[in-house]
Amino acid sequence: MNNVPPLNQSWASYPARLPLRILQFGAGNFMRAFVDWMVDVLNEEAGFNAGVIVVKPTATGDYHALRAQDGLFHVLSRGLQDGQRLEQPRLVSCVQQIIHPYQNWEAFLATAELPSLNIITSNTTEAGIQFDESDRFEDAPPSSFPAKLTRWLYRRFQHFEGREDRGCVILPCELIARNGDQLRQAVLQYASHWGLEKGFSEWLAKSNTFCNTLVDRIVPGYPEDGEQYCRQALGCEDALLVAAEPFHLWAIERQPALEGVFPLECCATPLQIRLVDDLELIRLQKVRILNGLHTIMVAIGLVHGLSTVAQMAGHKAWGAFLKKVAREYILPTLPLSTAEGEAYLQATFERFLNPFVEHRLQSIALNSIEKFKVRVLPSLLQYEKMSGQQPDELLFVLACLLQLYKKEERPFRDDSEAARRLQAYWHHSKNSLPSMVNDILADSGLWGHDLSMFQGQTLNYLQALEGGGSGW
């Protein structure tokens, strides 16, 4: 970039050093635009007064750009909010320290001795919360994230001599069900595997709170117009500018230790950090509505020549189709009030229509059969059970899904067992479409259910698609 200074402490109005209160494993686009952005808002508006220590969870890379910018970066919230276009940049300044445990293991462990630190967050990918029996206590560091965390917690236990008030609230952001429970189990496994004293396991269970969470925010990362935006709107060079949609949700299963952790009542900006009694309901809402409509878009859109989520949602016919499916077949099968369901649907369509996000259908098409089973099929089956009627629109989606997997050359790659199984039916159909459809739908190993009751209508739609029409 020409004629603009780099972003660092000398350029920015840097705040006073903050108490180191949060240990954060991972500083990719999502964590910076989600956790760090929220912490920064709370610091400014609610006196949260929390500094973040970023830990590199893997051996590769060094967060060089983050170091060069003294932990500073901008988050640009871009999209639709209440029907209006929003572009809102924020300079995030809560990252105070960056540690690479593969380069300085002792510096990482030493942070366990900080009395001010009481929150731990992480995003180490869905595969990050795993127990690996090859990790040894004396490794510096061990390979897995739970093993590193166990070593850190053990150092804290030893330093503070097992004091109950020196435990931590642990908030994993990995996108797996019951992520807190799974992380706790892995840490306890390491404690047992390494033969650590019983008192440590008791301290883990009694003084530390592992929270189950669900996170939701689309974070495209560095925007296509990033250089121009930095030069014209920010007046500085920011290699870590990260764009994110305005919508965000951090749902955390309620536990006593969480009360008062986030001073949301003092914050002017409405942050969607929600303590909930039933995290499963939040997960179900997201999976069936947001993710379910994504999977429906893939099946219809890629068969009918559309390429993005926004094209589908904004299409006169298909957009209306999606809303009808949601209102008639998905929302009635969820334990939501009409007002709650409609509000979530409206927010979902604002996200779909975000003019700043090019969410390509190809990028969300992987494992579409398995996704259909989890995201769409429960609504289909529950609607049929509740009403005694077959959901025509969802059977059309099923026909589109079968059509999508007909050819070996698809606009996306899917080497799953389900894809190979469905393709084999097409390969051996011997031009008998009715018997093939019946065999596919009766295959409970493929769907988890015998769907042959839906053979007639699904066949009608598939024959129309095979004939070259839209099928609807």
Image (tube, grey):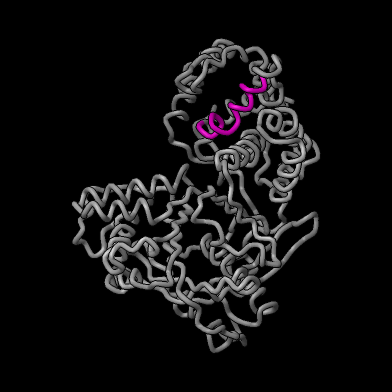
In the image, residue 280 above or below residue 242: above
* Viewport quadrant of the C terminus: top right
Residue 444 position, x and y percent, is 48, 18
Q: Could you tell whether 159 is left or right of 13 in the image?
A: left
Q: Residue at x 48, y 17 (%)?
A: 443
Which quadrant of the view contains residue 46? Answer: bottom right
Foreground: 360 or 118? Answer: 118
Res 251 visible: yes
In this rendered view, identify the residue nearer to me: 276 or 292. 276
Image: magenta residue range: 370-384
Residue 208: x percent and y percent? 39, 56
Is residue 228 rendered magenta in the image? Answer: no
Query: Which residue is located at x 59 percent, y 38 percent?
Result: 281
413 vs 398, left or right, is left
* Quadrant showing the N terminus: bottom right
Please indicate, yes or no, whether residue 152 appears anywhere in the rendered image. Answer: no
Q: Which residue is most to the front?
A: 164
Q: Is residue 468 above or below residue 283?
A: above
Q: Quadrant of residue 218?
A: bottom right
The residue sitting at 58% across, 66% down in the picture is: 37
> Which residue corresponds to the image point at 48% horizontal and 25% vertical from the top-left?
423
Whole-percent x, y for residue 143 in the image: 28, 57
